[in-house]
């Protein structure tokens, strides 16, 4: 397939289908849904081909051909797409979540055609974020992902209450403006050093930015990304959006959209602001820990099943960020593996809950009990997925947890205990919910339920579960692809850490150098050339 | 006639000739109605052709008071093209249903455009004043055509126009008293070279700028225009807004680049304050408005504030790659905003001010077009709105104009919410009646242009940059 624009096809095929569907006036919701699913399936098949050929069985030195075209020549921006060992898994996760959601929607929901159009654009834009090699393109896809996200709320809002839409709009558009500003600042600052204006991520990564700019860029980015990652206290939008949108969209948000934040933090935040990340490592760590503990505690007590999954996801994101900010090899790799594998498993759990909602008409834990007698297959699926979710050995999340915890223990053994506590609470919340719903005392609602649909309602989750088990049994397959992609970031961090330590040994810190005029003055005096 | 003068001011002459032609055809030959409209279009088209054919490659200076170059050429092309589109979009249909389908409206419109073009080319305060006065008198006369009897709001508006003229004259007198000349170049050289009399000149310029704001109905002096607009059709307001916003943009660009260029702090503070206040006042008003027309006016005045902020980052052209400067970014953003107004022209023939509590669905096409229009205004990627806003923010941050950048970011957020807040009013107010094929054709072309400028703006922007920087 040499010369075939594989990455572009993977990224834009769903969007092209969305354009086609917007002109195709079919009254059949199922036809629209299956066409949408087919387009995502084609992208998924190409992604699988790339994953197997280039990353799993192929020679790792041979990389997927990147696609690069001139786009905005005046500002040095290129249409530059590429897939590496890290992004391929995120792309795969996005397409799998999208495909599952669309098939689910086709079989079980009656959605208007605009739902599928917006959902396809959301899928394309999320893939775009993962494969963009140009900052302008990245921010372009980021902005594009906001619109369908908001419009999907509007599709579902039957009561036409605008407050949730407005709240989400302010959160996302506000954070987007912060991100645009930071991206422009990166490029503008880099141009003052290199003399060339560029948005290409690879070129920009070779430049060491002054600390003062790193600070600006970092805080703009971090606050902007905190909204997308739904870190405490910027998580307000998530709770509303999950309850107000379709179950499929909510599952996709928990599985993929939140991960775009952590992905961009790795690709942009850490890479371009290494000194500031090192300086504020503790602060970010505390934010991650608070998010983790807060999410786990709320998940433990919340009566709504959807919110239990939501807050435990928030806890997971906190944990992933916590291990990431350890800035060591194990922590960073573990963090990424958690983010990817969580995306697979949360899909099963959330869709199972949506299934229960469709059949029993409730999402409250207290209203359900003994559901295993009605849906035994689903109960087994939920239990296995719960074990996968809490990081049981043999499932994909286990190697991620293992690496992340060992990375945390290496740097912060005391805080490792706290994070372990958070993980245990999160695990208890999921297991307790599953136990209460499926094995608890049979409630009136379940007792009076007549089983009409005797199909095997658990089959849809099996392929994802097999994938999780495969990653759990052969974690090396994922690790060997993720690790080389993270190596460059780790090397950058390591070199900056050594540099900062050397500078501190000499009696000054990089921040003092930029802020203390006396030191600058003294340096000028001691310099014989000046 | 002097060939240089003819070449420099050919477009203005064509428009003045058009005024005479319409007067003759209306009052002596008694030709009106549709034929009058066709004559009007032909005049505008001839002016466009003249501008394209005689697009000056070099600057032509006429007696140190008028300068014709590619800057003025771009301004001429922009305004004439937009008025042709406006006419195709709304005027024919609007006027069919009202009693105003006569040549008088078009005569005043051509006078308004002539005033605008004279102001764009003027490099002397006196000629600038003449152009501005011609413009504002034409606007008042045009509005007057829609009043059948004496109207207090019209008198109120006239009073403000006179006040604006007086303020400008006062400013001009102060400057003339101080340096003995009203030429831009002389004022700039006095500001750059000597400290003596600088404060006096700046006071004079402040008076002139205040007068310009009053005459163009810009925040904080927009009250008179708000009162008048309630009684004029929407399409007329759109054309007046477009011309006023352009004349303000031209004058601010001219004064920034050709007059107060050495006074960096003064221009920076003035433009930031003006843009900031406009954004704050207008978008805040948008959130609270229940009347469609008021919401609409505040929305577009707010966007005017966003455009003005761009002028903070004007810099002399260099060939290095990078963000276009503030002047190009502001004009590009202005073009995009006016493109959305053209769409309004097509759909606003039946604007009714109603309560926003009601909600009605309309045809998919209308909804799609209005949705795309909103996406452009908010600045969603893929549309020209995104590239325009990105250039604007980039140019400000490139020049380290942090305050203006922060204001722009806040303003963009507010603009997004302001557009959203009025969506129900839009749906209820805009109705589509039949529609001509030419309308759908133009709407499709505009849509294609919006996507083209959103995805590949570089070629257009680089040409715009080269042309606009002939202002120096």
Image (cartoon, rainbow, N blue to C red):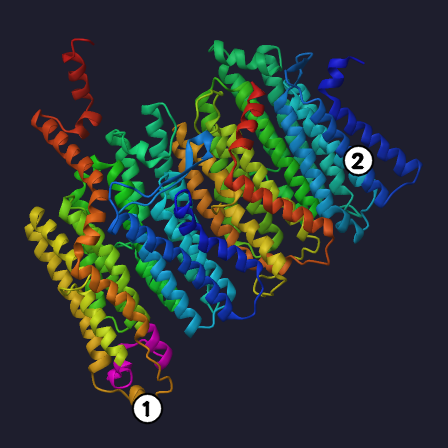
Residue A229 pos. (x, y %):
29, 53
* Residue sitting nearer the eye, A173 or A426: A426
Tally the numbered discs.
2
Q: Secondary structure at mark 2?
A: helix
Chain label for disc 1: A
Disc 2 marks which residue?
A: B42
Q: Mark 1 and mark 2: span between their CA atoms?
A: 79 Å
In the image, which disc is placed on residue A448?
1
Residue B27 pos. (x, y %):
90, 37
Q: Residue furthest right?
A: B29
Q: Is residue B244 magenta?
A: no
Determine whether B402 is above or below A377 in the image.
Answer: above
**Within 10 Å of the Cα at label 1, are there few (<14), some (14-19), or many (20+) other Cα atoms?**
few
Q: Is residue A373 magenta?
A: yes
Left or right of A120 in this view: A133: left
Q: Quadrant of the N terminus of chain B?
A: top right
The answer to whether one can see residue A273 in this image is yes
Determine whether B1 is above or below B335 in the image.
Answer: above
Q: Quadrant of residue B249?
A: top right
**Which residue does the image show at 18% across and 14% down from the upper left?**
A524
* Residue sitting nearer the eye, B144 or A5: A5
Residue A428 pos. (x, y %):
16, 69
- Mark 1 and mark 2 residues within 8 Å of each other at the beta carbon: no
**Within 10 Å of the Cα at label 2, are there few (<14), some (14-19), or many (20+) other Cα atoms?**
some
The answer to whether one can see residue A322 in this image is no
Asked if marks 1 and 2 fall on the same chain, the answer is no
Instruction: Decide whether the magenta segment is chiefly helix, strand or loop.
Output: helix
**Which residue does the image show at 45% across and 28% down from the upper left?**
B269
The residue segment tinted magenta is: A353-376
Q: Secondary structure at mark 1?
A: loop
Left or right of A475 in this view: B420: right
């Amino acid at each position: 397939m040499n010369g075939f624009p594989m990455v572009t096809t993977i990224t834009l095929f769903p969007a092209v289908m969305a354009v086609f569907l917007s002109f195709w006036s079919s009254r059949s919701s199922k036809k629209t849904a299956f066409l949408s699913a087919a387009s995502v399936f084609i992208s998924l098949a190409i992604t699988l081909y790339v994953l197997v050929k280039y990353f799993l069985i192929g020679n790792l030195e041979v990389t997927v051909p990147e696609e690069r075209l001139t786009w905005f020549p005046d500002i040095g921006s290129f249409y530059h797409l590429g897939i590496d060992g890290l992004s391929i898994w995120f792309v795969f996760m996005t397409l799998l979540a999208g495909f599952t959601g669309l098939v689910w929607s086709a079989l079980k929901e009656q959605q208007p055609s605009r739902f599928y159009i917006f959902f396809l654009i959301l899928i394309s834009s999320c893939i775009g974020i993962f494969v963009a090699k140009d900052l302008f393109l990245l921010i372009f896809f980021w902005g594009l992902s906001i619109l369908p996200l908001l419009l999907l709320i509007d599709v579902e809002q039957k009561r036409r209450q605008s407050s949730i839409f407005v709240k989400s709009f302010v959160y996302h558009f506000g954070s987007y403006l912060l991100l645009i500003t930071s991206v422009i600042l990166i490029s503008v600052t880099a141009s003052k050093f290199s003399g060339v204006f560029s948005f290409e991520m690879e070129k920009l990564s070779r430049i060491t930015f002054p600390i003062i700019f790193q600070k600006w860029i970092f805080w703009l980015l971090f606050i902007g990304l905190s909204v997308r990652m739904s870190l405490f206290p910027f998580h307000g939008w998530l709770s509303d959006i999950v309850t107000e949108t379709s179950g499929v969209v909510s599952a996709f948000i928990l599985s993929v959209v939140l991960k775009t934040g952590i992905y961009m933090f790795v690709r942009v935040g850490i890479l371009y602001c290494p000194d500031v990340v090192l300086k504020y490592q503790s602060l970010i760590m505390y934010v991650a820990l608070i998010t983790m503990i807060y999410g786990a505690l709320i998940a433990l007590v919340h009566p709504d099943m959807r919110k239990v999954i939501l807050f435990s996801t928030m806890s997971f994101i906190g944990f992933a960020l916590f291990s990431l900010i350890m800035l060591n090899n194990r922590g960073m790799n573990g963090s990424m593996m958690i983010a990817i594998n969580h995306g697979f498993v949360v899909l099963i759990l959330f869709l199972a809950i949506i299934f229960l909602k469709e059949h029993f008409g409730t999402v409250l834990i207290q209203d359900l009990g003994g559901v295993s007698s009605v849906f035994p297959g689903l109960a087994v699926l939920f239990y296995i997925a719960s074990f996968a979710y809490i990081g049981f050995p043999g499932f994909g999340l286990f190697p991620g947890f293992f690496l992340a915890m060992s990375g945390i223990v290496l740097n912060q053994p005391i805080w490792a205990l706290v994070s372990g506590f958070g993980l245990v609470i999160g695990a208890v919340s999921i297991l307790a919910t599953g136990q209460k719903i499926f094995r608890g005392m049979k409630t009136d609602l379940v007792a009076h339920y007549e089983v009409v649909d005797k199909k095997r309602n658990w089959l849809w989750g099996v392929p994802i579960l097999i994938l999780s088990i495969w990653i759990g049994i052969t974690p090396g397959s994922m690790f060997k692809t993720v690790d080389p992609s993270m190596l460059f970031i780790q090397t950058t961090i390591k070199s900056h850490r050594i540099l900062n330590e050397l500078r501190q040994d000499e009696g000054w810190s990089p921040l003092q150098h930029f802020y203390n005029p006396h030191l600058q003055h003294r340096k000028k005096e001691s310099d014989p050339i000046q | 006639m002097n060939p240089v003068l003819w070449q420099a001011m050919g477009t203005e002459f064509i428009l003045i000739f058009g005024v005479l032609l319409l007067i003759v055809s209306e009052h002596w030959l008694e030709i009106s109605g549709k034929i009058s409209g066709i004559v009007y279009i032909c005049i505008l088209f001839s002016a466009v052709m003249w501008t394209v054919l005689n697009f000056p490659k070099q600057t032509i200076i006429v007696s140190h008071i008028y300068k014709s170059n590619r800057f003025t050429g771009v301004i001429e092309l922009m305004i004439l093209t937009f008025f042709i589109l406006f006419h195709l979009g709304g005027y024919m249909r609007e006027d069919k249903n009202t009693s105003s389908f006569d040549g008088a409206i078009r005569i005043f419109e051509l006078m308004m455009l002539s005033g605008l073009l004279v102001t764009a080319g003027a490099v002397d305060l006196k000629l600038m004043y003449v152009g501005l006065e011609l413009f504002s008198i034409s606007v008042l006369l045009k509005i007057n055509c829609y009043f059948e009897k004496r109207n207090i709001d019209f008198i109120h508006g006239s009073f403000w126009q006179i006040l604006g003229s007086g303020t400008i004259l006062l400013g001009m007198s102060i400057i003339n008293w101080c340096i003995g000349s009203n030429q831009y170049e002389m004022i700039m050289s006095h500001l750059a070279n000597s400290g003596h009399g600088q404060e006096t000149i700046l006071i004079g310029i402040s008076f002139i700028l205040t007068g310009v704001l009053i005459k163009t109905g810009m925040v904080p002096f927009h009250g008179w225009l708000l009162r008048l607009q309630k009684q004029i059709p929407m399409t007329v307001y759109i054309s007046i807004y477009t011309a006023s916003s352009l004349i303000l943009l031209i004058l601010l660009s001219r004064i920034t680049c050709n007059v107060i260029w050495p006074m960096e702090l003064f221009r920076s503070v003035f433009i930031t304050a003006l843009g900031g206040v406009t954004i704050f006042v207008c978008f805040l008003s948008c959130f609270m408005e229940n009347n469609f027309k008021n919401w609409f006016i505040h929305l577009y005045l707010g966007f005017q504030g966003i455009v003005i902020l761009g002028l903070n980052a004007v810099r002399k052209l260099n060939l290095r790659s990078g963000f276009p400067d503030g002047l190009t970014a502001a004009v590009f953003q202005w073009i995009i905003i006016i493109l959305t107004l053209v769409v309004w022209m097509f759909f606003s023939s039946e604007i009714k001010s109603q309560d926003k509590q009601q909600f009605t669905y309309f045809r998919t096409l209308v909804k799609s077009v209005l949705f795309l229009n909103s996406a452009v205004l908010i600045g969603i990627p893929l549309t020209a709105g995104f590239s325009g806003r990105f250039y604007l923010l980039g140019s400000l941050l490139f020049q380290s104009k942090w305050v203006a950048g922060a204001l722009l970011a806040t303003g963009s957020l507010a603009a997004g919410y302001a557009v959203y807040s009025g969506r129900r009013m839009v749906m209820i107010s805009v109705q589509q009646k039949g529609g001509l094929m030419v309308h759908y054709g133009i709407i499709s072309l505009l849509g294609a242009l919006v996507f083209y400028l959103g995805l590949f703006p570089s070629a257009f922007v680089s040409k715009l940059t080269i042309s606009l920087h002939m202002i120096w």
